[in-house]
Amino acid sequence: MRRQDSSANPVTRRRLLKTLGAGTGAIVAGSTIPGLFRYAQAQSSEPIKIGFQVHRTGIGAAYGRWYDRTTQAAVKRINDAGGINGRPVEIIAEDDGTDPKRGAEVVEKFATQSNCDVAFGTLFSHVVIGSAPRAGELKIPYFVVSEGHHVASGMLNRYTLQPGITDVKSQVEAMGPFVAANLGKKVAMIFPDFAFGHDHRDYFTAAFEKSGGQVNAHIAIPPTETSFTKYFPKIPQDTEVLYHVMVGPAVLTFVKELGEFFGSSRPELFGFIDSLEAVDISSPGLEFLEGTYFWEGNPRYAQDNQTSHDMNYRQAVGVDANGASVSDAKDVSTYAHMFGCWETLNIIKAGMEAAGYQGPQDRAKLIEAVEAMTELPLSDDHPQGAKIFNGKTHQVFGHQYITRVTEGKLVLAHTTSIEDTFYPDEADYTSQPF
């Protein structure tokens, strides 16, 4: 990624008026009238409908439940502040079963039956890849809260954007040098055998080898696997660091079996928190994780340097200082990922307001407005941290957090710069017609 010139694709009042004028003579006639947008906004009090593609069932269900909770909290905050362009926001939720085929059907339902303005929410990369083509065909903006490199790689379309959460390639660009400098030079990787895991395999390997390290094994595991012991003998004996990222309902089993296999003679461990999302780190059998490191998109435990923005966000979503539900300390959140729903909804709001969005006829202007965004400062809208959005690749870049298990908690050990996560552009969606 290269820092953009914010004047390269401006969505200015003049440009918006010109675009609006091309659509209706009435607005052309009134384009010099003060308060044009306030007048236009007053024409409709109908809700803005956001189709929420949620993993209620399937391997993404734990994430889906917390994505839903975060989404509801974010929408309440937006509506309490007056909605978007004076209109309330309504969430239309549909379960995609964490299934690509069902995902495409859900997007189609949003566009053709539910009359949604935009679609939003998807996490698992294979569902995004299965759904995005349909969003492009139906010309409905599709705001995904995933981490795969599929958006920034250019394999999708102009209607698909990822403005609220960073992608795997940017994450591991920053992780590779840390692992090589602090943990060891020979790494074995364990990852799920689908697009998200393949991104880890490809991009961490490249980043780690660029830092002088060697990946001596790639061990792919089906994401629906329920027992993992049979895979561990594939780890070479000279491995200095085991890099693990696992997803799905069996993650606790994965980590426990890992500890049972190695006992006290384990290599250094560097994990993506996906291996422990929604899992209590003090669960019996996880004691061996003491002293090991994790990547987190947003630190689960409130840190000593906690900002007021993180504090306000936790309170709104109902999450305590340990990253669990305030109503049930055993209900651990997917804190490292779910902030993306909160931040993406605030991006949608800002984009619609910049575009003077009134309805589906303004979808292209909404996308152009988001493409024009660059710096997103740390705020209550963006509590995870400051970010830079690349309008060409439709991908956001931000700080990454490395935490260390210390006395049964995840304690911040290192925060990357945003620049640590940059890589050269691979696409320019702004060159594609709508």
Image (cartoon, helix red, strand yellow):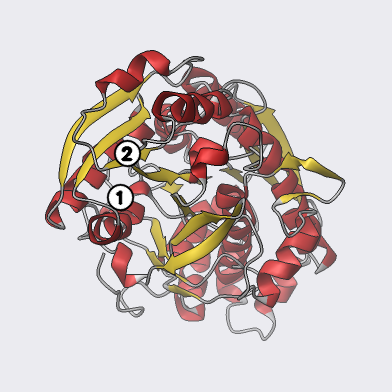
Which percent across, then down, holds residue 135?
47, 36
Q: Residue furthest right?
A: 327
Q: Amino acid at mark 1?
A: Lys
For label 2, the crowd category at 10 Å Cα-Cα, with few meaning under 14, some 14 to 19 and many 20 or more, is: many
Query: Regarding mark 2 in the picture, which secondary structure is present there?
Result: strand
Residue under label 2, please give it: 242
Residue situated in front as seen by the camera: 103 or 25: 103
Q: Which residue occupies the foreground of this view, 334 or 396?
A: 334
The kind of residue on which mark 2 rests is: Leu
Labelled disc at residue 169: 1
**Residue located at (64% from left, 39% from top):** 278
Badge 1, how many Cα within 10 Å: few under 14, some, many 20+? many
Is 55 in front, or is 210? Answer: 210
Image position of 64 with respect to 357: above or below: above
Please state which of the two labelled residues, at mark 1 or mark 2, is closer to the viewer: 2
In the image, taking residue 214 as reference, residue 390 lies left or right, namely right
Label 1 vs label 2: CA separation?
A: 19 Å
Which quadrant holds residue 194?
A: top left
The foreground one among 21 and 345 is 345
